[in-house]
Amino acid sequence: MFNSFAASLWLLPFSKYCKADNVYWKHFFEGKAHINRQQCDEMEYSSDNSGWPTTLVTIEVPTVRGTDAYPSIMDITEDITSNMECGKPTLLSFSAREVSDGTLFKTMLDYDPQSKALIHQLEKYYQGDPVLNPLTPWERPPIKNVFCIYGIDTKTEVGYYFAPSGKPYPDNWIITDVIYEFEQSLLSRSGHSFSGKPNNSSGDGTVSYNSLSLCKEWLGPKVNITRTPQAEHDGSDLQTRMNAEHYHGEDLFPNMTRAPHVKYITYYEDAESIPGWRTAVWELDKANHRNIVRMPVVMRELWLEMWHDMHPYSKSKFVTKAFRGPLRHEDCHWDYAKARCAFPEFCEYRSLTQFSLLASYTVFIFGNNGIFLSL
């Protein structure tokens, strides 16, 4: 399943209900390098799917086991495929914990000998890493400012169905179905029904919301939540919830509305935190994973936040969200509902007739000495 892309092992999920001993000190100071083992609380076994929306991996395994199920030469593939079609396949399901701790690959040893190489990679470069400690949800980095910015509410893959293809390695497995999370529901590529518990929001089209929202757990005990339109606004559609209670290790879901066809940005910002530290989480509606760093709204908010931090008389921890005027020419637009320029205080609207008159002039600028107009 991770044939040529070995880095996929670094993308394995984990359960937020499980932790592992930090082996950093033992590895570097006691010289005892060993495989990291998980310790899970009762929630892991009482909850469904390790807190994820659905079963992460479901595999259809054949009745034939071992090397006979996955030939390495093409001349026997046809016979094996016919045998597999006659048998009754079994469905095996694996949660996020069972993927990250290697249960998936150890189980598949009975059906696919190539899983042995994956177990070696998993234990050596993933579970045994003394610094990464990958089986434990990460804590907040010990730095002054943490801004976590990501997109939400885009259809995102959260589960996979695999089946044997009857072909030799490395093409012995195929994806037969994909489970997506979107708009508080779970969808499948094939249209088949399945069970699960979707989140209030979905991911950014690449990374699931379970992974993206992890940094919301780093917020302080009191959080200020603000939701505004991503576009320039006058504050009329501003929603706030101040000093919301937040418990360590838990997510936050504000009870706020969304107007149709309006993309919002929701800010979660510390109201109380360790002195000198700031933590903020920005969730942008419909922001794609690959394009978020090029979005003008993200650049605008980062620019305003930096100017706020550099201002010698700034009193608040974060820049105000009450108003967002246009900063560029592209931000000015015509408000068809009010039949006027959306921001007349900052933008100037000129008709095509005015532009055609101006186009008849040639403008010459000579340094700082003045402007000369000629027909």
Image (cartoon, grey):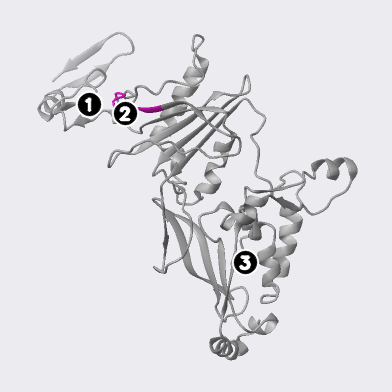
Q: Position of residue 85 (x, y in %)?
A: 53, 87
Looking at the rendered structure, the kind of residue marked 2 is Glu
Q: Which residue is mark 3?
A: 3
Above or below: residue 215 compared with residue 91: above
- Measure the C-alpha gap from mark 3 to mark 2: 46 Å
Query: How busy is the neighbourhood of tag 2: few (under 14 within 10 Å), some, or many (20 plus)?
Result: some
- Marks 1 and 2 in Cβ contact (< 8 Å): yes
User: In percent of the image, x 16 and y 32: which residue is there?
Assistant: 337
Q: Which residues are magenta?
A: 234-240
Q: Outermost residue toward the right?
A: 30
Position of the C terminus, as image quadrant, is top left
Q: Nearer the viewer, residue 207 or 52?
A: 52
Q: Does 27 sit left or right of 293 as displayed? A: right
> Could you tell me how far apart the alpha carbons at marks 1 and 2 are, in whole angstroms?
9 Å
Q: Is residue 167 magenta?
A: no
Q: What amino acid does circle 3 point to?
A: Asn
Give x and y (percent) for residue 338.
15, 28
Q: Earlier in the sequence, mark 1 or mark 3?
A: 3
Q: Secondary structure at mark 1?
A: loop
In terms of image quadrants, where is residue 164? bottom right
Question: Quadrant of the rendered structure where residue 26 is?
Answer: top right
The verdict on residue 237 being magenta is: yes
Dots 1, 3 in contact, CB < 8 A = no
Residue at the spot 67% in from the left edge and 75% down from the top edge: 112
Q: Which mark is residue 232?
A: 2
Return the disc, 3 or 2, that comes first in the chain's sequence.
Answer: 3
Q: Kindly identify which numbered label has been placed on residue 342.
A: 1
Q: Is residue 47 left or right of residue 191?
A: right
